[in-house]
Amino acid sequence: MRILVDMDGVIADFEGSFINLWKQQYPRQAYIPLEDRKTFYLLHQYPQELQPLAMEIISAPGFYRGLDVIPGAVEALHEMVNLGIDVRICSSPARDYHNCVLEKYEWVDEHLGSDWIGRMILTEDKTLIRGDILIDDRPELPGSDTPTWEHVLYDQPYNRAVGNKRRLTWQNWKTVLKEVLPLEQR
Amino acid sequence: MRILVDMDGVIADFEGSFINLWKQQYPRQAYIPLEDRKTFYLLHQYPQELQPLAMEIISAPGFYRGLDVIPGAVEALHEMVNLGIDVRICSSPARDYHNCVLEKYEWVDEHLGSDWIGRMILTEDKTLIRGDILIDDRPELPGSDTPTWEHVLYDQPYNRAVGNKRRLTWQNWKTVLKEVLPLEQR
């Protein structure tokens, strides 16, 4: 049983960290609170004149490395491994990869531990990666192949319009995955 | 038809670049010429007292980014794409990932072009990646799954002991792949 786990919006708090930096750097500018976020790409919901400011935050050195942990994520991933699940971190780097690729490795090293480096998979096309489940906050995962995995949505305000998929958070993941996996048999 | 292509020893000249740096930095020390290399990991063939010097070269900032292109590799990969093959770069970063991960992306960006960044897959376990062929210089590719791909060896002196696999170089790749793929029909 292999579970692929996305990073941003699933274990690394892209949205929360962005808002904190925005408030620090532009305290007089309005921002979109998480509960009002409707689009998968954060930039798409900001007015055009604010997009360069937002882009500057997310492409700055240290942004990806500095992302907060989504509460419960680290404990859940360690528990999955203890349950005998083959967990892999499966992430698509930003197109502007320069301040992203290495920092994703550093983030996993810092928050999950150096033995998790071997579990990292970076790919733009997740349909090429073999697994039973992909936990991802992105509404749709386009790619070349028909996935081997079931896409389980990590529940976020910006993906609530998706109705046809199982969804979970790190608060209820065991209950949700028990519908799919024989977790209790391990 | 998807071909996964490894980087070091296949498109990026790890061995040749190492020898050049060794000669520059330790001109009085002996080194192992490529034709005498017998082990997949270069360090394993150096005497223990020289291993720290070798390690210093391959873990230094700029080593992976500065690797020379293996002659013919870039032309072959572009030609594969023109033949309609779905080519992906499939590489396993060094355990000490710090000066490796980002530099592999930079190398591909510089030598293959920025539109190849989306073709990058970094993973320690290549058996998880779906493809028809993996071109790799490593004698064996251990992993969790039975691969979907056929491993075609990129011929190198240090993998000549492997007898049961197809092998190719960028000089004869089309002839070799024609045994497997209907290249001429495209």
Image (spheres, coloured by chain):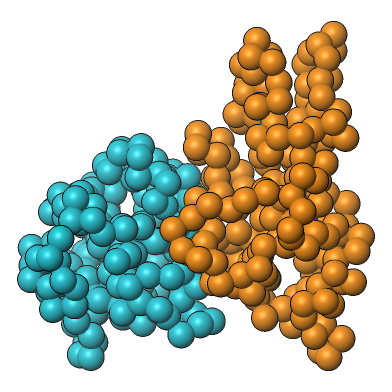
Chain colours: A cyan, B orange
Q: Is residue B148 above or below residue B23?
A: below
Res. B112 in view: no
Q: Quadrant of the C terminus of chain B?
A: bottom right
Q: Residue B91: image x %, image y %?
A: 60, 53
The residue closer to the viewer here, A61 or A31, is A61
The residue positioned 54% from the left and 67% from the top of the image is B147
The residue closer to the viewer here, B169 or A72, is B169
Q: Residue B76: image x %, image y %?
A: 83, 65
Q: Residue B33: image x %, image y %?
A: 86, 28
Res. A3 in view: yes
Q: Quadrant of the N terminus of chain B?
A: bottom right
The residue closer to the viewer here, A61 or A118, is A118
The residue positioned 85% from the left and 8% from the top of the image is B28
Q: Is residue B178 left or right of residue A7?
A: right
Instruction: Please state the total of marks drawn on the protein image.
Output: 0
Q: Please tell me in which quadrant of the rendered image residue B21 appears.
A: top right
Q: Is residue B63 left or right of residue A65?
A: right
Q: Is residue A61 left or right of residue A159?
A: right
Q: Is residue B161 above or below residue B77?
A: above
The residue positioned 79% from the left and 69% from the top of the image is B78
Q: Please tell me in which quadrant of the rendered image residue A103 appears.
A: top left
Q: Is residue A137 left or right of residue B56?
A: left
Q: Please tell me in which quadrant of the rendered image residue A73 appears.
A: bottom left
Q: Is residue B38 above or below residue B28?
A: below
